[in-house]
Image (spheres, rainbow, N blue to C red):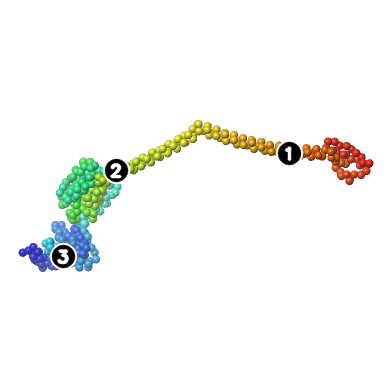
Amino acid sequence: MKVSELNLKAKSLLEAHFENISLSGEVSKITFHGSGHWYFDLKDEKSSIACAMFKGFNSRLDFKPKVGDFLELNGFVSLYAESGRYQFIAKDMKNSGFGDLEAQFLALKEKLEKEGLFEIIHKKPLPNFPSKIALITSLTSAALQDMLKLINQKGYFLAQIYIFNALTQGSIAPNSLIRALQRADEYGFDLIIIARGGGSREDLFCFNDEGLARAIFHAKTPIISAIGHEIDYVISDFVADFRAPTPSAAIDLIFMSKNELEQKLDELEFALKTCLKSKIHNADFSLLSLERLFKAKSLHAIIEDKIKQIEFLQKQLNSLIRNKLEHFKLKLMSLNNAFLQHEAFFQKSKDLVSIQKNGQKIRLEELSKDDIITLCSQDTQREAKLL
């Protein structure tokens, strides 16, 4: 019998005996395929089963399930012949609320949030260039290998890496993580990274432990929580000082590549030189201004300024005197001209005689016989009687 024949017979047998089954459980992971089909895992406290709900059935629903939902399904058991995988085919689905894991997660998140463990005031700043870093993860995990490979690729040479082995899955994982964290916190590291790769919700549930959350909160060292993929959230993400979406993202966050570091140093050197040049230029300008101010306020400068003021006043005085002298000179010339004109008139009129009668000038035609008159010249006068 061929493998394909066995799988087909098993498929027919399962579908014939489990054709109308009611199944309930919690969604632990789910994929919405581009074809329109849904593929998800349904679990209870002990087991899980792969499920599928094809487009023809899920198109009748008015909701989309999500991780943590508690579902009630109706359908049949089948087998995927190509891989021999046993699965449940859902024809109908009802959402009954949150499953146990999601309810536990939300209850603890609400409790710790009310206590203030997630508040930003408690977050410790991450160092820019850590020199001692602790990685808390499983020594056999792919996440550790990815992180070490990325560190090696970056060529970051400023830090020493210490690895603390811990379980990252299962019921005893929280205590293992707490012990590793407490040991690392005692060494005085610059930074601690708690890391785990992707997995189902139940695989990551150990990071929703209350004891681990409180250990992270009370640690003295800054802590990055790098659990699962970007869509995965656990309690350690909220209580840690920083949440990285993946372990590799945590390495990208804290480690600068050698080339990036060299470029950063070149930029800092250029900025430093520019700053120093600016400082020196400003200092030169300030010194020159102070020198000018000192010279302006020195005794020699004051004396020179006073001398210049005196010279200016002297020039003004000389100009004023010259203007006055010129004014009097012009006035004197005017008087002299008037005197000369008067002297010329005197010379011309010295032989002229005026007639007065009773002290008043009188015209010649106004005189009568026997009038007593006075004949006046410029320098003498005589009385006369008309005959």
| First-in-chain label (3 vs 1) | 3
Seen in the picture, residue 153 relative to 335 is either above or below; the reply is: below
Amino acid at circle 1: Asn
The crowding category of the residue bearing disc 2, from other C-alpha atoms within 10 Å (few below 14, some 14 to 19, many at least 20), is: few
Q: Find residue 271 and report its image quarter.
A: top left
Residue 216 showing in the rendered view:
no
Label 1: which residue? 337
Residue at image point 25% right, 45% down:
258
- Marks 3 and 1 in Cβ contact (< 8 Å): no
- Find residue 164 and report its horizontal and vertical position in percent: 18, 45
Label 3: which residue? 89
- Residue 113 is left or right of residue 282, and the answer is left
Q: Find residue 351 and report its image quarter.
A: top right
| First-in-chain label (2 vs 1) | 2
Between label 2 and label 3, give the one nearer the viewer. 2
Q: CA distance from mark 2 to mark 3?
A: 60 Å
- Find residue 257 and report its horizontal and vertical position in percent: 25, 46
Secondary structure found at label 1: helix
Residue at image point 18% right, 45% down:
163
Amino acid at circle 2: Leu
Q: Which mark is residue 265?
A: 2
Quarter of the image containing the N terminus? bottom left
Q: CA distance from mark 2 to mark 1?
A: 97 Å
- Residue 3 is left or right of residue 249, and the answer is left
